[in-house]
Amino acid sequence: MSLIKWTPMLDPFNEMERLFDGWPSASLSNFAPAVDVWEDENNVYVETPLPGVDPEKVNIAIENDVLTIEGSQEKKSEVDEKNYYRREVRYGSFHRAVALPAAVKGDEAKAEYKNGVLKISVPKEERAKPKKVKVEVKK
């Protein structure tokens, strides 16, 4: 007699994933790229992988300490869509807005695109120096 693994209940997550498998519009729609955000004493840094994206078609804006990255990735393929077995690479426009963890000088931001990764550094605003107040003790 052979043993068969018995599953007492359907896995709802697998069922939902299976439901959306094969939807071609998912790979053609807008998407939001993943970002890493960190800071040091002087700057805030944002890094996002954008492989295959023309850096000339990427727009970066900073307003009210919110960084916005938008652009598009065009499909460059000679394969007819009906011949795809699996299609997971996303094409089309993308948009991502990220609240920065500190007040920044947006007009001094620098961006670099290298090996498919966009790196942005933005200097932090100068913080007001604390003012010392002497407390007088009356006797």
Image: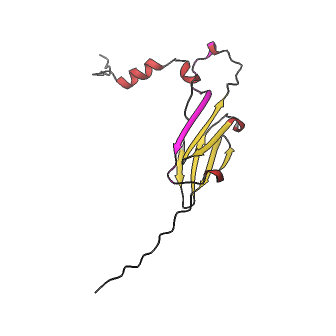
> Looking at the image, what colour scheme do you see?
secondary structure
Instruction: Give the quarter of the figure containing the N terminus.
Output: top left
Magenta stretch in the rendered image: 82-104
Furthest toward the top, the residue is: 82
Q: Which image quadrant: the C terminus?
A: bottom left
Horizontal and vertical percent position of residue 96:
55, 37
Residue at x 39%, y 20% (from the top left corner): 15
Please tell me which residue lies in front, 126 or 9.
126
Residue appearing at x 64%, y 15% in the figure: 81
The residue under the point 57% across, 51% down is 45
> Quadrant of residue 2 in the image?
top left
Q: Is residue 33 visible?
A: no
What x and y, as percent, mark residue 46? Answer: 57, 47
The one of 23 and 136 positioned closer to us in this rendering: 136
Does residue 51 appear to the left or right of 33 in the view shown?
right
Q: Nearer the viewer, residue 62 or 25?
A: 62
Question: Is there any visible trace of residue 106 in the rendered image?
Answer: yes
User: Residue 70 at what x, y percent from top left?
Assistant: 61, 36
